[in-house]
Structures are given as structure tokens and as C-alpha cells.
Image (cartoon, rainbow, N blue to C red):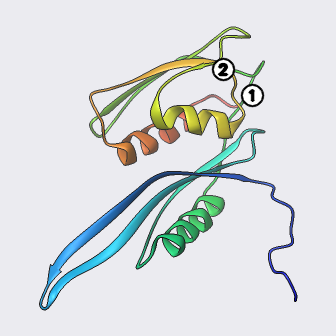
């Protein structure tokens, strides 16, 4: 029996959020699923994607495809970020700081996953005001894009 997808995995994928969305229509409810996925190679490339579908697996697959097409390159020095970044994106305020070797990732929620997938091992940070994971994810990606290229 032939197997498909024999190519080696070059990107690591993490599902950040799955939402069940219900809409009222004539004759009942219309239910779809929304998936937020992060993709990275742990060498400085990371991307996020938001996919929707009638079932969970197609939604995740759409999100992964989008994330792979829209990856960004994050400059890394000594396994940490280059400099401090402060950013306001919609309701979220982001603060990311470099950390010395051996500190680890002292950040919460989606920031930890995104920095890990980008290959950053030491950093500290905080997300203030927003608890919305989708907005927080986009805010962190925006913050990672702000680093000066080396």
C-alpha cells in the first residue's frame, strides 16, 4: 500500500487554539471549527496560521499550509533575542527582553510556543491587557518582525 507524505519533517507544528464556532441559521445551528497553528524550524523561522473548516483536521491542515507560506525570519544571537522590544498591537501590549544563557523562556502562553519554535532558548517577556490568544499570537509575531537584521 503506497504511503503519502514520505518527505522528512522539516518544520515542527503546534496547535495553539481550537475554537468551535456556532452560527444560527434557518433550520438550526451551523457549526464550524477554527484552528490557530504555529510552525517553526527551531533555526530562526516561524509562522502562524488561522484555518477554518467543517471539521477539526481540515481546519488544522489549512492553518498549517497558511503558516508555512507566511513564515518570518527571526534573528538570533547566543540563543536569545537581539534587543528589548515593546509593542502595542490592538488590545495587547508586548514586552520581550533578551536573557543570559541558562535562563530559559520566562514568558507565558503562546509566546513560549512561538519563541521555542523559532529556536530562541533564553528570553523573558510579558503580555499585558489582552487575554485573547489570537490577538496575542499576532502581537508576538509583530514583535518578532521588529528586530533589526544582523
Give the mark nearest the N terminus, 1 or 2. 2
> Image height check: is 50 above or below 75?
below
Does the CB distance between marks 1 and 2 fall below 8 Å?
yes
Give x and y (percent) for residue 114: 58, 39
Give x and y (percent) for residue 138: 44, 45
Quadrant of the rendered structure where residue 93 is?
top left
Q: Nearer the viewer, residue 74 or 14?
A: 14
Give x and y (percent) for residue 44: 73, 38
Left or right of 117, for residue 31: left
Q: Nearer the viewer, residue 74 or 13?
A: 13
- Return the residue found at the far left: 26
Quadrant assignment for the C terminus:
top right
Left or right of 13, for residue 2: right
Query: Dot 2 corresponds to which residue?
Result: 82
Q: Nearer the viewer, residue 9 or 138?
A: 9
Residue 150 tag number: 1
Residue 106 tag number: none
Quadrant of the rendered structure where residue 32 is?
bottom left
- Disc 2 crowd rating (10 Å Cα; few below 14, some 14-19, many 20+) is some
Instruction: Name the residue: 61% across, 67% down.
Output: 65
Residue 70 seen in the current view: yes
Residue 143 seen in the current view: no
Quadrant assignment for the N terminus:
bottom right
Give x and y (percent) for residue 81: 65, 22
- Disc 1 crowd rating (10 Å Cα; few below 14, some 14-19, many 20+) is few
- Return the residue found at the far front: 1
Instruction: Name the residue: 36% across, 60% down.
Output: 19
Q: Secondary structure at mark 1?
A: loop
Amino acid at each position: 500500500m503506497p504511503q503519502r507524505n514520505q518527505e522528512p519533517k522539516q518544520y515542527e507544528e503546534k496547535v495553539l487554539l481550537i475554537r468551535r464556532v456556532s452560527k444560527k441559521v434557518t433550520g438550526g445551528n451551523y457549526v464550524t471549527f477554527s484552528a490557530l497553528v504555529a510552525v517553526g524550524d527551531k533555526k530562526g523561522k516561524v509562522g502562524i496560521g488561522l484555518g477554518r473548516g467543517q471539521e477539526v483536521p481540515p481546519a488544522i491542515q489549512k492553518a498549517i499550509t497558511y503558516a508555512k507560506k507566511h513564515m518570518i525570519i527571526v534573528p538570533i544571537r547566543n540563543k536569545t533575542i537581539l534587543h528589548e522590544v515593546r509593542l502595542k498591537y490592538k488590545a495587547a501590549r508586548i514586552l520581550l527582553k533578551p536573557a543570559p544563557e541558562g535562563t530559559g523562556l520566562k514568558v507565558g502562553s503562546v509566546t513560549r510556543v512561538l519563541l521555542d519554535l523559532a529556536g530562541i532558548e533564553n528570553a523573558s517577556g510579558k503580555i499585558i491587557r489582552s487575554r485573547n490568544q489570537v490577538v496575542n499570537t499576532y502581537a508576538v509575531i509583530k514583535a518578532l518582525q521588529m528586530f533589526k537584521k544582523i
